[in-house]
Image (cartoon, rainbow, N blue to C red):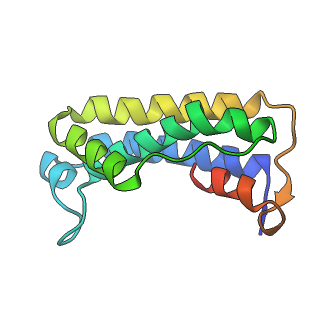
Amino acid sequence: MTLNKETVMDHYEHTLEWAQSLTEVTEEEWRSAITDGKWSIAEIIAHFVSWDEFILHDRLKEFWNDRALCKAPDVHEMNRQSAERARHEERSETIGRFIAVRTVASRNEENRSISLDYTLSDRSNRADVIKLF
């Protein structure tokens, strides 16, 4: 599978549009688990924000400079904290944070001088970073 800059940018545009559309779901849909034992839409979106912030602020500087990637935080704890925050946060704030971090990441991506045209199987460490967006 080849991933290129245009594909990444298209993905960002679509996720921003999709996130904005979540303002139209009912409060019950926003706060209810998507299925038994799963998170709500609110919790899922908040979890994306936390991981995007980690990638943007902690991983990309190593990624762009071809350095070893820093250690990830405890996955379960970060996810727990994200879900907890979403339970108490207004929907507009959660969606706003998601849009803000994805917009910053998108602009960061646009300003990079290196090409993102590569085969995922050839660059697994870089692919892991890109797949998280």
> 30 or 56, which lies in front?
56
* Quadrant placement of the N terminus: bottom right
- In this view, the residue in front, 102 or 61, is 61
Q: Could you say where residue 78 lies in the image, as x and y percent from the top left?
A: 35, 46
Residue occupying image coordinates x 70% and y 32%: 61
The image quadrant of residue 131 is bottom right
The image position of residue 94, as x and y in percent, is: 31, 35
- Decide if residue 21 is on the left or right side of residue 66: left
Horizontal side of residue 83 vs 97, given as left or right: left
Task: Examine the image and state in which quarter residue 92 appears.
Answer: top left
**Which residue appears at 77% of the width and 64% of the height?**
120
The answer to whether residue 112 is left or right of residue 57 is right
What residue is shown at x 58% (from left), y 48% (from top)?
Answer: 133
Tally of numbered discs: 0
Question: What residue is rendered at 80% in x and 35% in y?
Answer: 65
Residue furthest out toward the left: 28
Query: Residue 117 at what x, y percent from top left?
Result: 85, 52
The x and y percentages for residue 111 are 77, 27
Q: Nearer the viewer, residue 35 or 47?
A: 47
Compared with residue 64, is residue 35 higher up or lower down, i.e. above or below? Answer: below
